[in-house]
Amino acid sequence: MIDSIINFVADEKSHAMLLFVGGFSEAKDIAKRASSEIKITSESYVQEFFDVDTARTIKDRSLMKTESGNKRIIYIAFEKIHPESQNTLLKTLEEPTQGLYFVIISATQNILPTIQSRMSVIVSSGSTAYEMWAKKFLRSTYKARLDEVKSVTGEDEYDLKSRLNAILKQLPVESEFADGRSYLVECLTYSEGKGVSAKMILESLSLILPIIT
């Protein structure tokens, strides 16, 4: 993963990259190692819940000019992110400063598509972002699942189908999970209808699907 960041900065084709990781501890570790091992001036912002005040601080810091020919990296790592923080980050990414690079390391896949479109996106651990989300979802408590669903920003048909398919892929095939698999298939069919609420479907799955230990 560190090599990916090094190559990203050296390539200079994009000013921002997004790393999807499996958990906050992994996000913290990557930010710490990268800032230590990559010999480029940098600053790190690591928060379990990335708040809007920090996002505004980064926006102000991003306006600082980098000396001609030099590079600077801002590392941002978090498990969850406030919607307003995402909007602030989006404005920051829309007006990049010469020589400044952003490395955002996220333990959640709920990142606005408009942000992702401005970044090089890399998924760690050899899994898709949705598969990592589904794996975490199935292993969470019922309350944690419901809290996670509240933070889902994607309401479009593609996003919902991707989440449902990822859960189906992660759900064991043993007979004790047969009812859950059948319900998931029904949800996939229902998701093709108009005006479907992604949160409503995911909330029902949060309570119906058994916790995988």
Image (cartoon, rainbow, N blue to C red):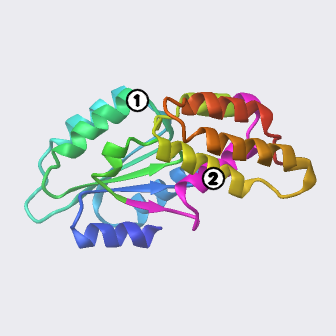
Is residue 208 depicted above or below 123 in this figure? Answer: above
Residue 118 visible in the picture: yes
| Relative image position of residue 131 (x, y in whole percent) | 61, 55
Image point (11%, 65%), residue name: 69
What label sits on residue 35 in the rendered view?
none
The picture places residue 57, in percent across and down from the top left corner, at: 28, 33
Question: Does label 1 or label 2 sit earlier along the sequence?
Answer: 1
Who is closer to the viewer here, 126 or 209? 209
Q: Which residues are magenta?
A: 121-144
Q: Is residue 23 visible?
A: no
What amino acid does circle 1 point to?
Answer: Pro
The amino acid type found where label 2 is placed reads: Asn
Compared with 169, 112 (above or below) is: above
User: How many numbered discs sit on the rendered protein?
Assistant: 2
Q: Tell me the residue at 20%/61% (across/down).
A: 71
User: Could you say where residue 128 lies in the image, as x and y percent from the top left?
Assistant: 55, 60
Mark 2, residue position: 165
Which residue is nearer to you in this view: 99 or 14?
14
Residue 83 marker: 1
Element under disc 1: helix
